[in-house]
Amino acid sequence: MNKNTFKTVKLGKGEANVYNFGEVKLHAYKTNDLISDEVFVVEKNGKAVIIESPCFFDNNRELEKYLDGVDIAGVLVSYHGAGGTFLPNSPKYATQNAADYSENGGGKVLIDNFIAAFGDSFDGSIHNITNIIGEGKVTIGGIDFNVRQTSEAFDIEIPEINAVYTHMLGHDCHSIVAGANHADAIISELRGYIEKGYDLILTSHYTPEDLKDAETKIAYLEDIKKIASGSKNAEEFKAEANKRYPQYGGQNYLDMTAGMFFKK
């Protein structure tokens, strides 16, 4: 499946890009919110499983309206634990470490920061996880998924469409990189995707990408490590990164990366 082969449904704020795999459809909901959230709906035989949820109230209601009439089998809540008012009566699935990440860990810190930054427009309530899942195969609504636990939450393989979901990629935008070791871990993960030959890589903050994009990101991460090793401080690091990648988005992510490479 080519990442650009989709039909777009324009909504009030966001839009849904629909990929047709025959028996299975993938709806990539682009929220157009302040943190560029992306939510994925895997639909088969009239049932749907949602990967992540929106985090702003207006997007919650918009996506619920778009899904009206679809039988929601469940929501997989991984890295984005906020947005708890989204489909409150649907089953919510997560690994234990993902639930802990959102309720008490680094995810909760991010949620609190977003509440402070965005105020009443941001849905800071945390999803009530009804079903704790483990690694390996899980079938929801007749759709098979493979859960792969990560240090913070979990990634998801979708075998029927040869796709994988992870938190972040973004071939032409900065990412949150928590130091050289984290960069190496991301590179290792991306190389694994290339070896497996996925058609699509789905992430929480970008439209669906492909293996060429993964290769671009690997080169970027290797360069970010070199820039950091040759910089004296965070400001010098950011200046050089912006010089080399002037068209990249995600300046706030670059700020966070700089803070992690150059801790005060």
Image (cartoon, rainbow, N blue to C red):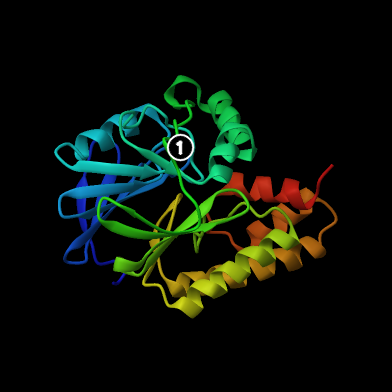
Report the side of 263 relative to 61 (left or right): right
Q: Is residue 126 above or below residue 247?
A: above
- The secondary element bearing badge 1 is classed as loop
Q: Residue at x 49, y 59 (%)?
A: 170
Q: Quadrant of residue 200?
A: bottom left
Name the foreground residue: 76 vs 177.
Answer: 76
Q: Residue at x 27, y 45 (%)?
A: 15
**Image position, residue 54 (x, y; %):** 39, 38
Label 1 neighbour load within 10 Å: few <14, some 14-19, many 20+: few
Q: Is residue 167 visible?
A: no
At which x and y percent is residue 53?
39, 40
The residue that appears at 84% across and 42% down in the rendered structure is: 264
| Frontmost residue, 263 versus 151 | 151
* 73 relative position to 221: left or right: left
- The x, y position of residue 203, in whole percent, is 45, 55
Q: Quick one: 78 or 249, which is closer to the camera?
A: 78
Q: In the image, residue 141 lies at what x, y percent? A: 26, 50
Q: Amino acid at mark 1?
A: Leu
Position of the N terminus by quadrant: bottom left
How many badges with numbers are in the image? 1
Residue 259 in view in this figure: yes
Residue corresponding to mark 1: 34
Q: Is residue 135 left or right of residue 87?
A: right
